[in-house]
Amino acid sequence: MEKATRLVRAGDDPVGVRTVNVPLHRASTVLLDSYADLVRANAGSHPGITYGTDGLPAQRSFEAALCELEGGAMTRAFQSGQAAIINALLAFTGAGDHVLIADNAYGPGQAFGHDVLARFGVTVETVPADVGADVVDHLRPNTRLILLESPGSNTLELQDVPAVVSIARPRGIITMLDSTWATPLRLQPFALGVDASIQSVTKYIAGHSDVLLGALTVAEPLADRLDEFCRITEAYAAPEDCALALRGLRTLSVRLAQHERSALELASWLSDQPAVGEVLHPALPTHPQHQIWRRDFTGASGLFSFTFSSEPAEDRLAAFVDGLEHFGIGYSWGGFRSLITASPVARRFPSRHAGRTVVRLSIGLEHPADLRADLAGAFGRLERR
């Protein structure tokens, strides 16, 4: 065998090693076993992976694991949480359809609906962030899909999902729920009757702020259409990110329990601080939709927000944020390090938070005593300036 041929073929035999974690493949071409397999692949009837865009083993393993946790019929992974939202809307809407999106849903997802879907003949309308049975007031004969996020990731409003589903399902309207805050461990969207669940895997599932990934899980009636859509669009996710997400999934239970405990401790403490106006955490009895949380959820996560009792000047707010030692200033959430953002929240519907600065805290895995001391120091700076 010539060296040029040996260079091509060397090391391509399997070594027969079994590992705890799924093997990582980086591939475009997938070798088929026979001409018969090639015929089946050409006909679209091959049952296995025939090309890298089908989703390599790490992606398929992650999707299977998440689908089992969600209780759906099929899961597909995408390059980000936003990509999951975009593909969910594209897969199940068409020209002439009317779509409803909750006012507290992920901002870029709303923007895609209003600014991009609208170009292709889809009408997108916003509904209140706390919508329930009153969603009926927004329906049209051509309403095709309702996208909810409960709770929203800034001001933490919840929708009455079962009430929305009870109105949508008899009319053949698809309901989708972005359930990233709760993860499949704290909420089972399909048990509430929704047709599809969206997860920003970037957040708690991956858990280490080093992965961009999203996932869409659907119930049986939508599975074939999602599968066909993903095959035609060659929608797939990076195998390395899927492998990291699968690794994160293994420890989600223990991490989320700590996030939840620490966040509740800090939220309760913040509720007693004179400088705090309102703590926005669904697990607190003071939350406007607390009863919905008690009914539908089995627990909480580590993300919540608060407002100030008196709106601070810009320089005082900067001093509050910039002096924090344990809270990084940055977007996203669900990772091991605590994060903070602070900004006004824009809403299409009237909101009691209009014109107020909303401080969002993602509570990480630091000891809550250190985080509490850090925030106490920030309140001290707020008062001194």
Image (cartoon, rainbow, N blue to C red):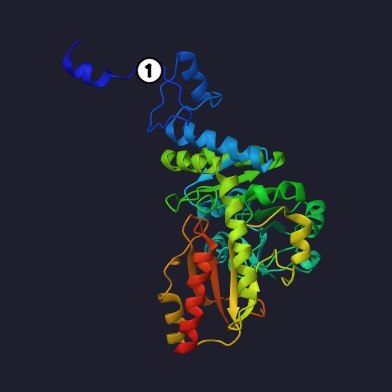
Query: Which residue is at the far top?
Result: 1
> What residue sits 63% from the left and 41% below the top?
225
Q: Can you identify the residue that label 1 sits on?
A: 15
Q: Is 347 above or below relative to 144?
A: below
Residue 265 position, x and y percent, is 62, 65
Using the image as rendered, state which of residue 225 and residue 6 is in the foreground: 6
The location of residue 246, given as percent across then percent down, is: 51, 39
* Corner quadrant of residue 241: top left
Q: Would residue 160 be found to the left or right of residue 234 on screen?
A: right
Q: Can residue 171 be seen in this view?
A: yes
Where is residue 220, by image quadrant?
top right
Which quadrant, please, contains the C terminus?
Answer: bottom left
* Quarter of the image that includes the N terminus: top left
The type of residue carrying mark 1 is Val
In the displayed structure, would residue 7 be above or below residue 73?
Answer: above
> Is 76 or 41 nearer to us in this picture?
76
Q: How many labels does the image show?
A: 1
Q: Which of 236 and 283 is in front in this view?
A: 283
Query: Which residue does the image show at 80% across and 59% down from the upper left?
Result: 163
Q: What element carries label 1?
A: loop
Question: In the image, what residue occupies the spot 40% across and 31% down?
Answer: 25
Position in image of residue 52 (x %, y %): 43, 33
Specify whether residue 105 is in view: no
Q: Categorize mark 1 by other alpha carbons within 10 Å: few (<14), some (14-19), many (20+).
A: few
Q: Work out whether 114 lies above or below 47.
A: below
Q: In this view, does 373 lie to the left or right of 157?
A: left
- Residue at point 81%, 58% (across, down): 167
Return the residue nearer the eye: 105 or 151: 151
Q: Where is residue 102 in the image (x, y as percent from the top left)?
A: 66, 65
